């Protein structure tokens, strides 16, 4: 077979294309295990999306097609180079604050002076009984004040006051999560009700003293998501900083070899958490292709996919198709494993015959592979998904391939990303 169409995209572009797949979820007030897992997933996506200007632009443009309004917030002064995104849909707002990604952010991380929550009185490093005072990390507080500058605090409060059904979620990873906590304290102190204000952090460091933790533990609805083995959350303990809020511990998947603190690991855990709670990746696309299509079992290259990934990935790949095609018939068998060397010799006749028997005009063949990248860091793989479209006579009409590296993503994220970056327009509309 001759490859007619092939596409490869930078991992960041691929990832945020895939992000749209998940952001079709519309968080609601958490009233059950699935609702809570859904909200954590949405916040994890936004936390990862807050990291880069390039990805932020792509995120805004694509989320807009799903009904989300995305606003970039960038404030820069001598205290911090603050970056955040405000995502809005219906009665939900998610303010995601970027984590450490610049030298200025590193300076904020290491601006370790302990200051009063609402003043600039600093505490000496050896001051006794400092835990009895409402001190906070100077760098985090400075960053939070910059984020809320230029009238953002007043705008958020006004929106919440005008719509009692609206909920504001504050989120971020690492530095971004710590800053989100202080932003939450600031808004709570200004009169925003606990019912309308939620904080969801990922791998965040403690922000202040024991007294601060005691004062706000019941006042602020804070959930701290941590991955077992992530030591960053403990990094300021020796300086008297104390965590508070509800702690939720994730365990990194056995298929991931990234450092526990990486946001990709937190997002991977959130995806698995959502799926384990009973979530699916179904959504209704604005428009659907009505071509009669038979989707053959997904061909998985032998030994390339761990069963823990397959349990989520294979149904998700089928969900993605049913989201966009109104006249789709899925093969009764979800997947088959084949040796990579034998795939090229496959003629797919049995799938073509099944399509004809069912009255389908097209056959969709999908081939999933994850192969170690030569000369890349240990464990890095290129995850690829190839799609071949045949007519009901078995003649290939189109082919396309997409891939993503696991250098910055997990296998699960890379595979889902590859699916979502494939063009759905290659199949003619009936």
Image: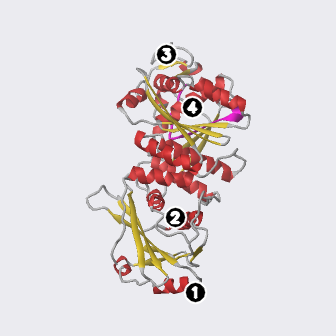
Q: At numbered mark 1, what does the secondary structure look like: helix, strand or loop?
A: helix
In this rendering, which labeled residue sits more in front, label 4 or label 2?
Answer: 2
Image coordinates for residue 23, horizontal then vertical, percent: 57, 50
* Alpha carbons under labels 1 and 3: distance apart: 81 Å
Mark 3 or mark 4: whose residue is earlier in sequence:
3
- Crowding around mark 1 (Cα neighbors within 10 Å: few <14, some 14 to 19, many 20+) is few
- Crowding around mark 3 (Cα neighbors within 10 Å: few <14, some 14 to 19, many 20+) is few
Q: Which residue is mark 1?
A: 357
Which circle marks residue 313 in the picture?
Answer: 2
* Alpha carbons under labels 2 and 1: distance apart: 28 Å
* Alpha carbons under labels 1 and 4: distance apart: 59 Å
Image coordinates for residue 414, horizontal then vertical, percent: 43, 58
Q: Which residue is mark 3?
A: 127
At x 38%, y 27%, the residue is: 107
Residue stretch rendered in magenta on the structure: 194-208
Mark 1 or mark 3: whose residue is earlier in sequence:
3
Image coordinates for residue 72, horizontal then vertical, percent: 49, 35
Image coordinates for residue 213, horizontal then vertical, percent: 60, 28
Mark 2 or mark 3: whose residue is earlier in sequence:
3
* Alpha carbons under labels 2 and 3: distance apart: 53 Å
Left or right of residue 320, residue 339 in this image: left
At x 66%, y 43%, the residue is: 90
Q: How many marks?
A: 4
Q: Is residue 195 above or below residue 4?
A: above
Which circle marks residue 181 in the picture?
Answer: 4
Mark 1 or mark 4: whose residue is earlier in sequence:
4
* Alpha carbons under labels 3 and 4: distance apart: 25 Å
The verdict on residue 206 being magenta is yes
């Amino acid at each position: 077979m001759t490859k007619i169409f092939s596409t490869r995209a930078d991992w960041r572009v691929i990832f945020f294309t895939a992000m749209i797949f998940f952001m079709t979820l519309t968080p609601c007030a958490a009233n059950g295990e699935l609702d809570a897992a859904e909200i954590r997933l949405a916040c994890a996506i936004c936390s990862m999306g807050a990291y880069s200007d390039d990805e932020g632009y792509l995120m805004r443009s694509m989320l807009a097609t799903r009904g989300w309004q995305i606003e970039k917030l960038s404030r820069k002064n001598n205290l911090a180079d603050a970056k955040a995104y405000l995502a809005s849909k219906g009665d939900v707002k998610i303010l995601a604050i970027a984590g450490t990604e610049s030298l200025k952010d590193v300076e904020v991380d290491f601006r370790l002076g302990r200051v009063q929550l609402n003043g600039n009185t600093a505490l000496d490093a050896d001051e006794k009984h400092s835990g009895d005072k409402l001190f906070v990390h100077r760098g985090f507080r400075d960053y939070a004040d910059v984020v809320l500058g230029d009238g953002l605090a007043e705008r958020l409060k006004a929106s919440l006051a005008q719509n009692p059904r609206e909920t504001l979620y504050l989120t971020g990873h690492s530095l971004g999560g710590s800053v989100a906590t202080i932003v939450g304290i600031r808004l709570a102190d200004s009169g925003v009700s606990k019912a309308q204000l939620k904080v969801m952090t990922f791998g965040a460091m403690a922000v202040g003293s024991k007294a601060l933790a005691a004062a706000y533990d019941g006042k602020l609805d804070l959930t701290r998501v941590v991955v077992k083995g992530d030591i960053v959350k403990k990094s300021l303990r020796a300086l008297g900083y104390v965590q508070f809020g509800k702690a939720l511990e994730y365990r990194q998947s056995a298929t991931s070899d990234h450092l526990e603190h990486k946001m990709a690991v937190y997002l991977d855990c959130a995806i698995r958490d959502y799926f384990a709670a009973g979530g699916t990746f179904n959504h209704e696309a604005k428009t659907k292709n009505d071509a009669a299509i038979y989707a053959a079992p997904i061909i998985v290259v032998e030994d390339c996919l761990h069963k823990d990934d397959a349990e989520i990935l294979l149904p998700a790949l089928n969900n993605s198709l049913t989201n966009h095609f109104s006249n789709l018939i899925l093969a009764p068998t979800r997947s088959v494993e084949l040796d990579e060397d034998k795939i090229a010799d496959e003629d797919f006749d049995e799938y073509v015959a099944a399509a004809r028997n069912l009255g389908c005009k097209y056959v969709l063949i999908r081939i999933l592979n994850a192969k170690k990248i030569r000369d890349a860091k240990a464990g890095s793989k290129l995850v690829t998904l190839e799609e071949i479209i045949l007519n009901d006579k078995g003649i290939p009409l189109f082919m396309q391939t997409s891939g993503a590296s696991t250098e910055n993503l997990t296998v699960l994220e890379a595979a889902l990303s590859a699916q979502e970056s494939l063009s759905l327009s290659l199949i003619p509309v009936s």
